[in-house]
Image: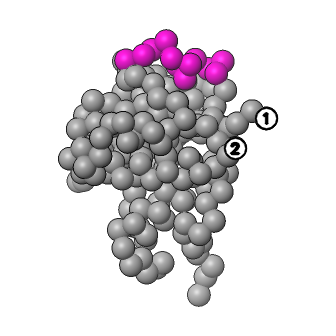
Amino acid sequence: MQKKRIVIAMTGATGAIYGIRILQVLSEQDEWESHLVISSAGLVNLKYEMGMERSELYALADVVHGINDIAASIASGSFKTEGAIIAPCSMKTLSAVAHGFGDNLISRSADVALKERRKVVIMPRETPLNLAHIRNMASVTEMGAIIFPPMPTFYSKPDSIAAMVDEGVGRVLDMFGVNVDGMFEPWRGL
């Protein structure tokens, strides 16, 4: 049985916990194969924010690709994936995706997913936003990507940072059909 493949890209924006948690959830799913790409700035944040070594992150992924490996499988549309998640996404990477500037494997794999009409979810981490950020978000939305800022919900009454992260990660992975039972409580009305 062919596993469903998904690209997980991590950049230097704050919020490494989102990419890590996505990989943790996918690693527990027998039917999914994760393809990780992380930028050099992403590795810096991984160490600074999470105290995590590169090898620990790599162990969570099924396949790891180098940021500059433009000949990687995920750089081609003929390599079937369900799409890509960029979590967290820097404004630099957002701009590269918005302008089709495939200068590294993160922006190239997002470009490939968009051109093949596959799902792309971008979790941007910046605040406040300037007009260039907003226009780039509009541009990728017009291309078919989904902008999903990792903002906590409070109607679920989260009791920890982990619960807030799980709610966002669960909702993103649910968009791809990943089993996320128990990660978040869908709104059912009052």
Q: Are marks 1 and 2 in contact (CB under 8 Å)?
A: yes
- Asked if residue 155 can be seen in this view, the reply is yes
- Kindly indicate the quadrant of the structure image that contains residue 118: top right
User: For the residue carrying disc 1, how many other residues have a C-alpha within 10 Å: few (<14), some (14-19), or many (20+)?
Assistant: few
Check disc 1 and give the amino acid type: Met
76 magenta-colored = yes
Check disc 2 and give the amino acid type: Glu
Q: In the displayed orientation, state which residue is furthest to the right.
A: 1
Relative image position of residue 16 (x, y in whole percent): 33, 48
- Count the marks: 2
Q: Which mark is residue 181?
A: none
51 magenta-colored = no
- Asked if residue 126 can be seen in this view, the reply is no
User: For the residue carrying disc 2, how many other residues have a C-alpha within 10 Å: few (<14), some (14-19), or many (20+)?
Assistant: some
Q: 91 left or right of 19?
A: left
The relative height of residue 7 versus residue 165 in the rendered view (above or below) is above
Picture residue at 24% right of the left edge, 44% below the top: 47
Relative image position of residue 32 (x, y in whole percent): 64, 42
Stretch in magenta: 68-79
Q: In the displayed orientation, state which residue is furthest to the left.
A: 48
Q: Which mark is residue 1?
A: 1
Residue holding disc 2: 31
